[in-house]
Amino acid sequence: MRRSRPRWLVYVLVIAGLLAVALVARWLATGGAAKNAKAGRPPAAVAVASVEVGDMPETVNEIGTVTPIDTATVHSQLSGYVMGILFKEGQMVTQGQPIVQVDQRPYDLALAQAQGTLAKDSSTLVSAKLDLKRYQTLSLQDSVARQTLDTQRATVGQLEGTIAADRAAVGTARLNIQYSTIKAPFTGRIGLKQVSVGSYVTPSDTSGVAVVTRIDPIDVVFSLPQADLASVQRKAGTAQGLPVTILDQDNKTVLAHGKFSTFDNQIDTTTGTVKAKARVANPATAGATGEKAPLLFPNQFVNVTMLVDTLHQVTIVPVSALRHGAQGDFVFVVQPDKTVKIRVVRMGPSDGVHTAILSGLSKGETVVSEGADGLDDGSAVRLPEGKGKGGSHRKQGGADAQ
């Protein structure tokens, strides 16, 4: 019969096996790596940049919607047939410029009728006043009844009221003649026509005859996080205000410049943002066809860049030098022995090319700007030829130029 091994011996063998596995893993992680380094593993090739000191603009970048200051659907104020369209679709119109002519003839006749009624009633009033004067003379001679005199006074008063109504009717008729020529309510750009010659228009038409929008200046509405509300309000109250730049959807072409105008009066609780408005100049410029047109159109989506503040004389590194990990934001700082050391930093605002570093770096230090993938604390690196410590100069017109 086979004898079983003692239980304690089994435990010893298991523990010994586990220790052997751990030792092998440790050798692979440390001894093996050191062995590979000693075997001549080449340092990683990297690009480097010098830590500089300069000014960094603090901006707010949001998506906005172009909104005209005034938009009016122009309606006819009387009924009649359209006799003429006096505008070209899409053209710029000035305040008071005729845009549609409604048939004026019925209103000319109404004015003539009102003037005739006024003339007739005016003549009757003159006669009544003469009779009143005679009755007053006879009353002094006790030759006419008191009641007759009072009745004549009342007749004159009634006729004077009739004359006032007649004059109002004449004024209304003249006003209707003015209304027969529909005019632009303000200076702006007119849209597509909603009526044609021969159409019958009334004041109740929902579409009106055309839509006019004020385009210069024009507003841009965008949303700001409520966390930025205090800083924007503080800077907006200064005499300089907050400059705003409007760019196209590709965020490349500048369309207009303006200034921050105001906030909405409440925060949207669903998004935690507040609506803001900037007012910008939007003059009509000549296009490829030679016709003048504004660059910004109502309801157009644009990118809004608002300069809130400028940090002066702060350390600056390229955006590509920043890394992110469990320890937070960090960079690889190149040491004199051409190894790198992890340095945790506190990031500030960025202009898209460079980032301000609020703490963790000093001017003149060298950081890895490219090729940092695979590097670790203490890794050896190979610097570009001719750059013992490397350098990166910010181009004029970047953040310093702001």
Image: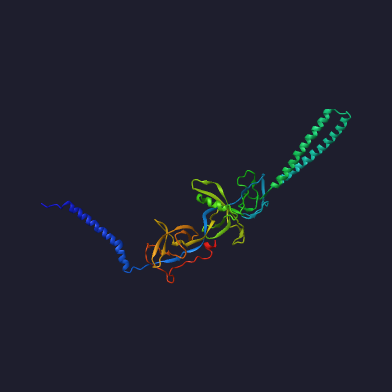
Considering every residue shown, the one lying at the far bottom of the view is 386
Q: Residue at x 75, y 39 (%)?
A: 166
* 182 to the left or right of 19: right
Picture coordinates of residue 206, whole percent (x, y):
60, 45
> Does residue 144 lie above or below 361 as drawn?
above
Asked if residue 159 can be seen in this view, the reply is yes
Q: Quadrant of the C terminus?
A: bottom right
Left or right of 214 on screen, residue 387: left
Residue located at (53% from left, 62% from top): 400
The percent position of residue 104, horizontal first and vertical second, equals 70, 47
On the image, the x and y values in percent for residue 3 come to 12, 52
| Scheme by which the image is coloured | rainbow
The residue shown at (77%, 40%) is 118
Which residue sits furthest left?
A: 1
Q: Total marks drawn?
A: 0
Q: Residue at x 28, y 60 (%)?
A: 26
Residue 322 placement (x, y as % from top left) = 44, 60
Give 73 or 29, whichever is nearer the viewer. Answer: 29
Q: Is residue 25 left or right of residue 244?
A: left
The front one of 379 and 161 is: 379
Q: Based on the displayed image, in which of its 4 quarters is residue 258 positioned?
A: bottom right
Q: Is residue 267 above or below residue 337?
A: above
Whether residue 221 is visible: no
